[in-house]
């Protein structure tokens, strides 16, 4: 029994299951904005299953595709596959199970969701290869996460709608911005391995400004959603709070001191997504 629990712990750590907290609030934010209230419990359940399946598949894929690179990087050599805690063959099984969950959830939601799953899956697979040939890997990762609010919106509405694109674009900019910050840790390693990233090509100072610019436009997109959806004051409070958290996040990271990247990455970003969802929920569900 202890072995099962330990194996489960390793798997959850391998895919950073706790980081679902970054994406899930945006998915449910898309769902309640699409429904202009609380979606049915059936929709909520299958959106949750789709999120867990898609994100788990993406993380397992990334760990499998990159495990030889991870084994050479001092920062990542302790991950499950390089350490031999999980085998590549076992990871393939987990990938298949995750995609089955994703496709099943899409099938249960509506035909358009099911129709879009191959495209979504292709983006999830593509991301892990992009660092081998393009500096835009951060934007591709942002695109992958932006499918969370878009997918949840479509799950409820059954169609594409303009506000969903605005919200998804905001999420893409947010993720790309903080992924650039996270990549600052690997500049020298990326140079040695011939991997692509914005920090590798621009250096620390310019990369910090690119990240700030992306987060500035993320805030603009979120404010633009206010008149587009006829939202209220509580939504604006949520956006203002998220904007302040972005400023705080950037204040933690300086050109000569990258020691607080993990605090910025894990803490501030979790609070950003949660605050936006919470105040959107208050505005759309409680105050209407």
Image (cartoon, rainbow, N blue to C red):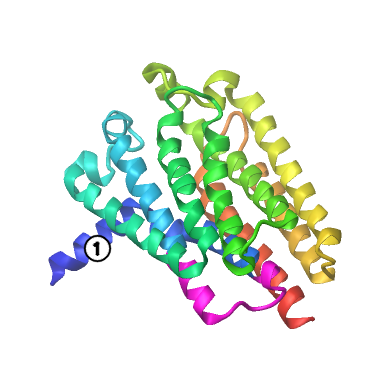
Category of crowding for the residue at label 1, using alpha-carbon neighbours closer than 10 angstroms: few (below 14), some (14–19), many (at least 20)? few
Q: Is residue 261 magenta?
A: no
Foreground pick, 266 / 232:
232
- Where is residue 196? Give x, y as percent: 48, 23
Specify whether 281 is left or right of 197.
Answer: right
**Residue under the image location 58 percent in, 36 percent down:** 139
Where are the magenta residues, as a range?
Answer: 32-49
Residue depicted at 41% across the width and 31% down the height = 129
For disc 1, the marked residue is 8
Left or right of 161, for residue 267: left
- The residue lying toward the viewer, choosing from 101 and 179, is 101
The front one of 164 and 194 is 164
Find residue 228 and report its horizontal and vertical position in percent.
Answer: 83, 59
Residue 260 visible in this rendered orientation of the protein: no
Across and down, in percent, residue 6 comes to 20, 63
Q: Position of residue 13 (x, y in %)?
A: 33, 55
Q: Quadrant of the image for the N terminus?
A: bottom left
| Label 1 secondary element | helix
Against 103, residue 64 (above or below) is above
Q: Does residue 75 show up? A: yes
> From what the image shows, is residue 36 above or below residue 254?
below
- The answer to whether residue 4 is left or right of residue 108 is left
> Image quadrant of residue 209?
top right
Quarter the C terminus occupies? bottom right
Residue 40 among those drawn in magenta: yes
Q: Main secondary structure of the magenta part?
A: helix
Q: How many marks?
A: 1
Q: Is residue 1 left or right of residue 31?
A: left
Name the residue at 61% across, 59% down: 273
Q: Quadrant of residue 206?
A: top right
């Amino acid at each position: 029994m202890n072995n099962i629990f330990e194996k489960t712990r390793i798997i959850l750590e391998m895919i950073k299951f706790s980081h679902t907290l970054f994406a899930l609030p945006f998915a449910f934010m898309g769902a309640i904005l699409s429904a202009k209230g609380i979606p049915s419990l059936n929709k909520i359940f299958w959106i949750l299953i789709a999120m867990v399946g898609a994100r788990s598949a993406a993380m397992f894929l990334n760990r499998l595709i990159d495990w030889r690179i991870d084994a050479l990087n001092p920062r990542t050599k302790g991950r499950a596959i390089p350490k031999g805690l999980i085998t590549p063959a076992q990871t393939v099984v987990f990938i298949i199970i995750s995609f089955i969950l994703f496709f099943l959830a899409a099938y249960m939601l509506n035909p358009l969701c099911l129709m879009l799953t191959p495209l979504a899956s292709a983006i999830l697979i593509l991301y892990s290869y992009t660092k081998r040939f393009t500096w835009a890997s951060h934007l591709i990762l942002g695109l992958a996460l932006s499918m969370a609010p878009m997918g949840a919106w479509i799950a409820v509405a059954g169609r594409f709608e303009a506000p969903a694109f605005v919200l998804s674009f905001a999420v893409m900019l947010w993720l790309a911005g903080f992924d650039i910050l996270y990549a600052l840790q690997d500049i020298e390693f990326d140079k040695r391995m011939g991997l692509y990233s914005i920090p590798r090509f621009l250096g620390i100072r310019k990369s910090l400004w690119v990240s700030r610019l992306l987060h500035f436009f993320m805030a603009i997109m979120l404010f633009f959603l206010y008149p587009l959806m006829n939202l209220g004051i509580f939504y604006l409070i949520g956006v203002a709070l998220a904007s302040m958290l972005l400023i705080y996040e950037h204040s933690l990271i300086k050109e000569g001191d990258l020691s607080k990247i993990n605090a910025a990455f894990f803490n501030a970003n979790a609070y950003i997504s949660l605050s936006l969802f919470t105040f959107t929920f208050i505005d759309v569900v409680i105050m209407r």
